Each structure stands twice: as C-alpha cells, then as structure tokens.
Image (tube, grey):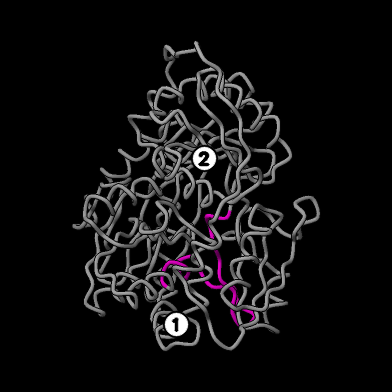
Amino acid sequence: MKISISGIRGIFGKDLMLNDVLKFSNNFSVLIKSKKCVVGTDTRLSRNIIAETVKAGLMQCGVDIYNLGVVPTPVVFRESRKYGAGIVVTASHNPTEWNGLKMLIDGKGINQEQLDLITNEQVTNKSKIGLENNINSAYVDEAAQIIGKVSDNPKVIVDVGGGSAKNIASSLLQKIGCDVITINNDLEKSSRGPDPTSDPLDELVSKSKDVDIGFAFDLDADRLVVVKNGKKLSSDSTLGLGVAKALELGCKNFVLSLDTSISIEKYIKKKGGTVFRSKVGEVNVIEKIVETQSCAGGEGSSGGFIFPDFNFCRDGILTSGLIVSLMRKDEFSDVLNLMEKYHQIREKIEVGLEYQEKVLKNLFDILKEKYRNLQTLDGIKVIVDEDSWFLIRKSNTENIIRISTESNSLEDARNIHLQTKELVKQSYEQIK
C-alpha cells in the first residue's frame, strides 16, 4: 500500500483491504465539520464494494453521504466545495488491479497533517447514523459557462480509456459547440492502458488525422493528453496550452511543479507573467497557488492544468474545453512552437522504500562536487544551464525514484539522462 497526500492506493485484495478502507473512512470523519461528504468512483471493477465500505464507515460516524456514482475526480472536487468534504474511490492512472481513496476537504486534497490524522486511530462519534442521498452534479453547465461557446463546430475525438470521463467529457465538449466522437468507452475492451501520459495511444493517434484535435484521459480524468494531426503531444503541452489560455483570460501569476518544462516558464515570462515553483504533487501546487495568490498552474509531468477559480485540482475535463476554445488562435501554435524546441525524458527506477532517502543523500553528496546549482525543494534538481536540468525524486504514488530530464538539445537530454540514470542505479547498488 502506498500512502501519500496524492492518495491511499494499493492492489485491492492484496495490500489494500476492506478493513483498511473502513478504518481510513472512520478516521476521515473526524475532519468533516459539515457532516456531509460526496462520494464518487472511477470505473475499476472493485469500485462498488470499496464505495459501499467508504459510505458505511462515514455513515456510522454520523456523516451524511451524497452519492455521485461513477464520475471524474474533478466532479467530486467541484461538489466537495459545496458539501464540505469528498472521497473519490480511484487509483487514478495506476494499473486497473489497483484502487484507492482520494480524500478532500472543502474542495482541496488533504495535506500532510490531515493525512497523518487519517492514518492514525481516532476516537469517532458513533451516536448517530448518517443518511445516504443520490445527487447529480451541475459540473458540465458550470464548466461551459467558464469556457463559453466555440465557433466553426470543431471535430473532436475523445479517448476515455474506459474511464469515468465517458459521458462528462463528450457532454461538455458538445455543449460548447464541438462535434464529438468517443472511443474506448468500455474499460475491459479498451485498446490502451489507464495512463495516457505513458501509453502510445495508437488508436487515438491514427483516428486524430481525420479530426481537428484529440484528447485522452486517465481513469479518473484529472490527467489529459492532447493529440493533434496524428501526433501525441507531450504531457507538458497540456499544461502549456492551459497556461496560454489563462494568460489570454488575464492571469499573471502561475505556479508550476518543479518537474514542469522550462519552456512553459519562459513563455509565461515572455508574456509578462510571474512563475513560482512548487514541490511535485497536486496538493503542493495548490498550496503554493493559495500562498502566492496565483490564478493558475499545474504539473507538466502528469498533463495537469489547475484553474483554481473553478477547481482546486488537475482538471482534464475543463482543460479539454479551454484548449478547444484556444485552438483557432495564434497563442495555440505559439506556445507549442516554443515547447517543441525542448525535449523531456522521464523514467522511473524501482528502489525499495527503505533505501530511497539514503540513495538521495548519497546522490546529493556526489552531485554537489560536480554542479554548482542544486535545489533540494523536492528531491534533487540540478540546473545544468539555462536550457537544461534534471530532477531525481521519490514518487508520491509508487515505490520508485523518478528521473526527469530536459534540454533544448535532444542529444544533450539523452546524455544527461543516461548519466543520471546510471548514477542512481550505482548509488542504489552501493547502499543495498
């Protein structure tokens, strides 16, 4: 089981059991001041039994349940602003045998202090049983008001990957004026995996040649990947396009996660904006957005754009509509042309949880002898030059160390990445 501010996740029936779900739900009830909680799920086969356990755990502690059924994570975030709390039964982009819980308070993901409370036994009030209600969300109508109508009836293909974006994404895009085709509606028959950022998306790439633009979502629809003219764009491009739209709307201050492309930062500054950097992880980006009073931000590595006036989360559904509304404008090609000059390589190396801190400390001692500009906000980020960097950090969701590399030279990016990868492996072997 992996427990972090990104969520509690595990392989259901192996390291995530129903008694764990019940315990975490009981403990979470202590944080719910409104005594109201919305509950939604993605499309994993284990969703119903886990959701029923979540609801039972909350209801026995006097919390009223507002059940949304199968919906994207951004819909639960949006509704939890109104009701005070939310739980999404999802493991996001992880393999389908995984599942988990994403817990929300007042429309935001929980922080580390709240997570510590949830994972430790709490004294709960069980004097009253909560009630269960089924509700519908006005998400589509509210998102459409933010985006507005688009002209020329653009043709859009949506690859939901068998996930919870199935009805919501197409409904929103149609409402703003798009002609929409969906593929991979059924999880068990989907032609691709749950994470669009790592999957080649062959079917969507092929079919996108006949439409204006294509979108691919992960199982809970917070991640979004863009496909244009038969080419899968980088996950950073999603954020870059969202940022370009936010600049058009008048935004000036932005928060980017530490592993986001330098090209997006350069584009923002070129347009007169200001950039703040945060630790990797949605909650960390949100906290920095609130702290700096920024009006947008996100994580390039996960294809996630955050527009806090609407939602305090990566919102793939809203972002798809915002990108369509930008598609006919110069800013669309301007930001992509700049981003295409930069090359990102991202890879993960399995490292036992008990060794990760020691590996990072060993790497820092080695790297500080070679490089002058080291940042330790989140792992180790090395600024090689103004157009090249690499980042080594622990994952928030898996027992791995992630390596991210970027340069405006593909050859340099490959060389830097290969050297860094070998260094991580050597360090791990020395410590084991």
Q: Amino acid at mark 1?
A: Phe
Q: Is residue 224 magenta?
A: yes
* Crowdedness near tag 1: few (<14), some (14–19) or many (≥20) residues, C-alpha within 10 Å: some
The C terminus lies in which quarter of the figure? top left
Q: Which residue is mark 2?
A: 398
Q: Which mark is residue 64?
A: none
From the viewer's perspective, is residue 361 above or below residue 206?
above
Image-based side of 360 in relation to 429, left or right: left
Which quadrant holds residue 381? bottom left
Which sits in the foreground, 308 or 407?
A: 308
To which quarter of the image does residue 257 belong? Answer: bottom left
| Disc 2 crowd, CA 10 A, few/some/many (<14, 14-19, 20+) | some
Above or below residue 432? Residue 165 is below
The residue nearer to you, when weighing 79 against 169, is 79
Residue 170: percent from the left, percent from the top? 65, 66
**Residue under label 1:** 332
Outermost residue to the left? 372
Q: Earlier in the sequence, mark 1 or mark 2?
A: 1
Quadrant occupied by the N terminus:
top right
Whole-Å distance between the Cαs marked 1 and 2? 34 Å
Magenta stretch holds residue 407: no
Q: Label 1's element?
A: helix
Look at 69% across and 46% down and name the residue there. 43
Q: Residue at x 28, y 63 (%)?
A: 254
Q: Residue at x 41, y 22 (%)?
A: 30
Q: Nearer the viewer, mark 1 or mark 2?
A: 1
What amino acid is at disc 2?
A: Glu
- The magenta stretch is 221-240
In the rendered image of this protein, does residue 355 appear above or below residue 142? above
Rendered image quadrant of residue 91: top right
